[in-house]
Image (spheres, helix red, strand yellow):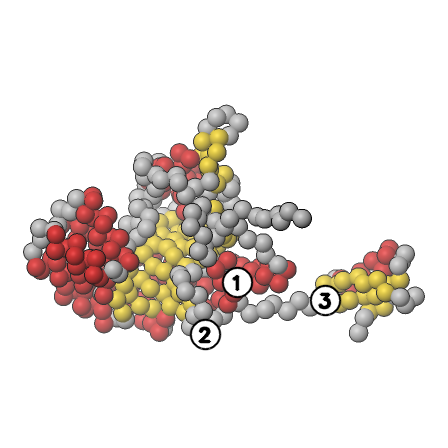
Amino acid sequence: MQEIRIPQGMRDLTASQSRRKEALRKRIEDVFESFGYEKICTPTIEYAKTYQIGFTSSTDFSEMYRFLDQDGKMVMMRVDMTVPIARLCATRYSTANPPFRFRYCSEVFKIRHTFAGKRSQVTDCGIELIGLDENSDIEVLYTALKVLQQIGTKEYRLEIGNSGFFRVAAEKLNLSEEQRTTLADLIDRKSLVELQEYLEKMDVSDEIQTFLQSLPLLGGGSEILNEAMESSFCEELKQEVRKLMKLDEDLRKLGVMDHVSYDFGKIPHLDYYTGIIFEGYVSGVGTSVLSGGRYDSLVGRFGRDLPACGFSIKLDVLLDVLDEVEKKVIRIGYPKGKETEALIYSETYRKDSCVELVPWEKQQIEVIL
């Protein structure tokens, strides 16, 4: 018999997995709602041009599911929710007064050429706070910490960086696009040996080499902010550090510093980030489960200049660390041929409970104890 498979990177969920995922989704969306975020939905399919605008004019489509629609225009399955929400904000909300607090829980799609545990279809739950400047970053970070807490694992951590730190350094050093891209990759991967070898080939001073080599290691608790300040070679870099110092003070007031760390070697993988970037980790999962940041220029690319900050959490990577969700069911036995009578009998219980009808050999209809 021929084996019937599903496409690479896709996944079936069993009833047990679906219950765990739905229970987590509900807890997360309850957190979002408690902060005043309203749910919105966007189409699963977007015009390719939307992502060309959102990411850059040189958008790489190799990891995107794309095809032609009935009019011959290229469309694609959404790869994230931030770009469609930026489009929505600049169109459907073009005359509404900000701020906008949007939340979502939607499927996103990305082709995984080398399948190594990553899925091509995942469920993203997230928020976007649009129309407020970086002073509102603390609200988004606090919401992210509340979401990580709701996952239910013993340990969780939010790792905060600043996309402007490396960008400012690159501008001050007049790095070429190739140098900037290579250094960003090496620093983000924390590949210290390759980074040293590459810097030795560059025409930069020993001071700058030392600075760039220190970035992958410039991570830790609040104390690392002072080290970052000392290593900053210009006032613009120091200003970026001061922004994180201000956030650190606010997070301390909120009593969440046991779950916060900083990483100045964190480089954004998406080009629309302009300020803080952050990732969330929980025990038992070897990769980040939450990611986000500030993107003050993205909505403007669609015609309305508004600052914004947000994050998303990937539900699917958490399934294996979630506790089993008990399914409470009342089972009612009935003799075959008495299905209608059993449905009538079950209505009394169905008002408050989940009821499952089970055919049996007995002649009466009753609750199975």
Quadrant in the picture for residue 22: bottom right
**Kind of residue at disc 3:** Val
Question: Which residue is nearer to you in this view: 183 or 25?
Answer: 183
Question: Which residue is nearer to you in this view: 156 or 10?
Answer: 10
- Does residue 252 appear to the left or right of 324 in the view shown? left
In the image, what residue occupies the spot 26% across and 66% down?
219
| Position of residue 362 measured from the top left corner of the image (x, y, whole percent) | 90, 67
Label 2 – label 1 distance at C-alpha = 15 Å
Residue, disc 1:
319
| Position of residue 325 measured from the top left corner of the image (x, y, whole percent) | 60, 67
| Position of residue 238 measured from the top left corner of the image (x, y, whole percent) | 16, 59
Mark nearer the N terminus (2 vs 1): 2
Mark nearer the N terminus (2 vs 3): 2
Quadrant in the picture for residue 239: bottom left
As drawn, the residue found furthest toward the top would be 71
Q: Of tags 1 and 3, which is closer to the observer?
A: 1
Image vertical order of residue 130 relative to residue 17, above or below: above
As drawn, the residue found furthest toward the front would be 1
Q: Quadrant of the C terminus?
A: bottom right
In this view of the protein, can residue 211 be seen by the observer? yes
* Residue at disc 3, secondary structure: strand
- Does residue 328 appear to the left or right of 166 in the view shown? right
* Number of numbered markers: 3
- Which disc is residue 94 wearing? none
* Residue at disc 1, secondary structure: helix
**Kind of residue at disc 1:** Leu
Residue, disc 3:
329
In the image, what residue occupies the spot 59% across and 61% down?
17
In this view of the protein, can residue 134 be seen by the observer? no
Residue, disc 2:
154
- Badge 3 density bin: few <14, some 14–19, many ≥20, Cα 10 Å: few
